[in-house]
Amino acid sequence: MHSLKNTGHKLLKSINQQKVLYLIFSEGSISRVELAHKTGLSQQTVTNIVNRLLEDGLVFESEHVPLVAGSGRKRVALSVNSSSHYALGIEIAGKYIRGCVYNFRNERLSSTKRSVDKYKNIDDLLQLLHEVIDELLEQVPVLAKTKGIGISVQGLADSKQGILLRVPGLGFLQLPLTSLLEAKYELPVYLENDANLLAVNENMNGCLSGSTDNITLKFDYGIGGAIFSDTRLISGSSYVAGEFGHYKAFTGPEAYPCHCGGTGCLTTLLSISGLQHNTGQTLEAFQQAVRSGDESMIHLHDTMIRTLAVAISNLVTFLNPDRVLLTGRILESWGIDIVSKLKETLMESVPMTSRGVELLYMEQMPEETLLAAGLVLKRVFEIPLDALSL
């Protein structure tokens, strides 16, 4: 009973501190009096928390400014020491591993990259990853101020357990990446699928903010997808919800075999890797052939667009989202006009009850490493409400 009471006290203390820290971070500058008012905590509790944060170097006191204009009363403003704390953002892709060091102002301080034709095995992947992290840690201005490592992977990941489930070129695996890296570097490590990470970012403060039910589709080296329902990311029972790349869409001569074991998957032609594998054409060469009037490539191009439009229409009919976000280099190569064509087919195909859906196009994707580093910031400033049931 005594142990349970101590656990509850520590949890409440942690939650109160995170409330204060989050407010200082989100407000940019705030006084102790305002913190007490907005959190409902006593001024003494706020003072104790602020003293700990000052001692840890997470916040600093800025200049005295008027609390109320013309009142003559002054306050000491508190701000997060954003420029003196750091996070590593790592992007694991099919052909490279790239990483950057960011401060908490989202300013990139350094970067490095390792390229590969194909990962030979898990040890090869880990070696390259270690090289990237080791080089970045050497470039962090103050190593002790590094708050964690965020990893975005173009594959499948169990983000709750920190397990890497699939990487392009290696197929399915069960690699406990988070625990391995935390043991080696003694830093918190956070792992997420790239499409999920993009969707979470856009739902929080991007083009999907205000939406309750939406789909994100990324057509790039591979195809990634994410589903939000009632403002929550849907992972699925085995963390593969949103894997739209394996939607069976192509038929006839365009129904190529897929690495998943099926045929006609979207990823076989609507991803950069699939297009090159099945046609022998890079994305650039394919687009050049279309522009040059190659009839076979024009036919394939039209088939790809028509198939994509039907696939999106079916997804909208099945899931009834209020917004669909499209992005990736495949769509970028087609130009912004493609969105109008897709919208036209979408409105003709879906039921009347689903025609309120908004189709969005993100021409410039956010920096993957910055989104990955954002995982660290999120954990530093979030309030651990999921622990309240203890």
Image (cartoon, grey):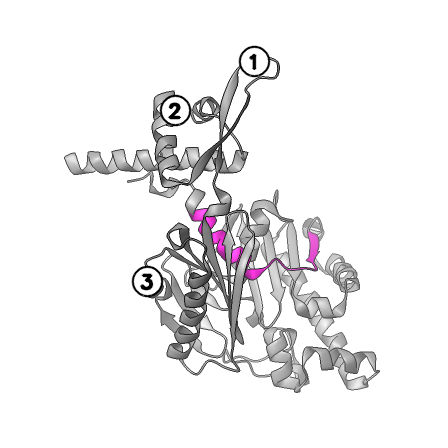
Q: Which percent across, then down, holds residue 275?
A: 64, 80
Q: Nearer the viewer, mark 3 or mark 1?
A: 1
N-term-proximal mark, 3 vs 1: 1
Residues at circles 1 and 2 in contact by the CB criterion of under 8 Å = no
| Residue at the farthest left position | 2
Alpha-carbon neighbours of circle 3 within 10 Å: few (<14), some, or many (≥20)? some
Q: Which residues are magenta?
A: 358-379
Q: Nearer the viewer, residue 8 or 124?
A: 124
Q: Nearer the viewer, mark 1 or mark 2?
A: 1
Where does label 3 land, which residue? 179
Give how far apart the Cα atoms at labels 2 and 3 are.
Answer: 36 Å
Q: Nearer the viewer, residue 37 or 325?
A: 37
Which numbered marker is on residue 41? 2
Q: Please, what is the three-letter code of the amino acid marked with disc 2?
A: Leu
Q: Which percent across, then down, holds residue 59?
A: 44, 37
Q: Please, what is the three-letter code of the amino acid marked with disc 1?
A: Gly
Q: Please, what is the three-letter code of the amino acid marked with disc 3?
A: Ser
